[in-house]
Image (spheres, grey):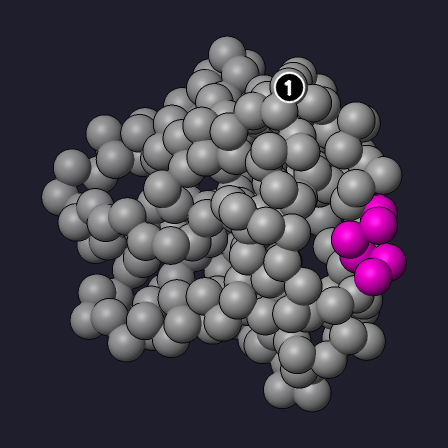
Amino acid sequence: MKTIRFIRHAESAANAGLPTTDPGGIPLTENGKLAAALAAADYHGPEPDLIVVSPYLRAWQTAEPFIARFPGAEIETWPVQEFTYISPARCVGTTTADRRPLVDAYWNMASPTHSDGAGTESFADFTARLLASLKKLRLREEENILVVCHGIFMNAAAFYQAPEEDPSDPDSMRRFHQYTLDDPVPNLGIWGDSNPPERLAKPAGTSADEQRTARPCATGRSG
């Protein structure tokens, strides 16, 4: 039976509340690197035949210990990066807290076709990228696939499996955003590609209470 598992990257500088600049270049913290190594050592899923990694630095740094543990796996970079919807030019040197008003304004507008400029994509473009990636994953011949990616991407993979949810509908976009707030993906959280998605394991070093109170990094660029 084919298995596809998604894992969110470990704690990044943005997750830790530090100022950041380039969405793709945000690194893991030292705690994040340690947690990723522990998660790879403690990984109990089937040995992956294919490891798919987002092009973003924090995803690659998370993937490195998994790649080292499973040297027989094929390694590929796919466009499973996070949804960047606030222009990076507006966010240079800012923290998650600094970006909160921009994030709130974006989701309150709920316009699937709106783009904030260079370096961003519309919600419609993001969901099209997401659905294309999911289709490609399911068509691959490998039986066991591990995808190292991001929180909003994983939430969208779960939410838009429901056939009644149309990503071109502003109301669906609002429901999706509320879903990300109500059911956040913690750092190193693992989901299986089933319907509904299965939470397969708690992140290494994270208590159940911490998971319940966790929230996605609402930055528009660093989940």
Q: Is residue 15 left or right of residue 8?
A: right
> In the rendered structure, which segment of residues is drawn in magenta?
104-109
Say above or below: 70 vs 107: above
Percent position (x, y) of residue 123?
62, 64
Residue with the mark numbered 1: 93
Magenta segment includes 107: yes
Percent position (x, y) of residue 201?
56, 46
Residue drawn at (50%, 12%), measured in percent from left and top?
A: 30
In the image, what residue type sits under mark 1?
Answer: Gly
Question: How many circles with numbers are drawn on the protein?
Answer: 1
Residue 206 showing in the rendered view: no
Q: Is residue 127 left or right of residue 110?
A: left
Residue 137 showing in the rendered view: yes
Q: Is residue 154 left or right of residue 135?
A: right
Percent position (x, y) of residue 179?
77, 61
Q: Nearer the viewer, residue 36 or 204?
A: 36
Residue drawn at (32%, 71%), measured in percent from left and top?
A: 136
Q: Farthest residue toward the left? A: 72
CA neighbours of label 1 inside 10 A, class few (<14), some (14 to 19), many (20+): few
Say above or below: 197 vs 5: below
Label 1 secondary element: loop
Q: Farthest residue toward the top? A: 30
Q: Quadrant of the N terminus?
A: bottom left
Say above or below: 57 vs 55: above
Q: Nearer the viewer, residue 56 or 164?
A: 56
Residue drawn at (79%, 26%), measured in percent from left and top?
A: 98
Predominant SS of the magenta segment: helix
Q: Quadrant of the C terminus?
A: top right
Percent position (x, y) of residue 148?
41, 45
Q: Nearer the viewer, residue 70 or 76?
A: 76
Residue drawn at (68%, 69%), measured in percent from left and top?
A: 112
